[in-house]
């Protein structure tokens, strides 16, 4: 199958590049949607922190700030797990 060319905002794109941009856009929209839903679930019934983590996972592929925040969330979850299991103080 050949890559067909078409115009998008004055730029000539191949079908492959257009699909890559579309996938990237969908990942970003999905990530931010999950973040907003997770934030709402912190005060409403639902798995808020899990949803926020999933949103950050989707965004971490595209944004360095999301990757850093996800790593911080992982570290805090590990510390909390150790504290709950009778290990060290979570500080």
Image (cartoon, rainbow, N blue to C red):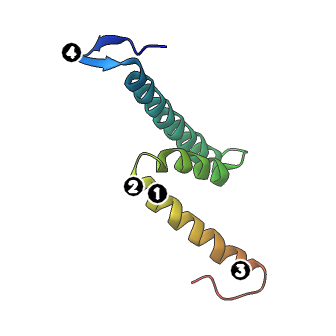
Label 2 sits on residue: 64
The quarter of the picture where residue 14 lies is top left
Q: Is mark 1 on a helix, strand or loop?
A: helix
Relative to 77, residue 48 above or below:
above
Q: Residue 10 carries which label?
A: 4
Q: Is mark 2 on a helix, strand or loop?
A: helix
Contact between marks 3 and 2 (CB within 8 A): the answer is: no
Residue 25 image position (x, y, % from top left): 44, 30
Q: Which of marks 3 and 2 is in front?
A: 2
Q: Which of marks 3 and 4 is nearer the N terminus?
A: 4
Crowdedness of circle 1 by 10 Å Cα count: few (<14), some, many (20+)?
Answer: some
Label 1 sits on residue: 67
Q: What residue lies at 60% left-to-right and 45% top-to-bottom?
A: 38
Q: Earlier in the sequence, mark 1 or mark 4?
A: 4
Q: Nearer the viewer, mark 3 or mark 4?
A: 4
Q: Which of marks 4 and 2 is nearer the N terminus?
A: 4
- Disc 3 from disc 2: Cα separation: 27 Å
Q: Nearer the viewer, mark 1 or mark 3?
A: 1
Label 3 sits on residue: 82
Q: What residue lies at 45% left-to-right and 53% top-to-bottom?
A: 66
Residue 72 image position (x, y, % from top left): 51, 67
């Amino acid at each position: 199958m050949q890559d067909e060319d078409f115009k998008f905002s004055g730029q000539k794109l191949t079908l492959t590049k257009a699909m890559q941009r579309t996938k990237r856009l969908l990942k970003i929209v999905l990530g931010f949607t999950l973040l907003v839903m997770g934030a709402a679930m912190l005060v409403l019934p639902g798995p808020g922190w899990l949803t926020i983590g999933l949103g950050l996972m989707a965004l971490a592929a595209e944004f360095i700030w999301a990757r850093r925040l996800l790593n911080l969330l992982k570290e805090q979850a590990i510390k909390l797990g150790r504290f709950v299991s009778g290990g060290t103080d979570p500080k």
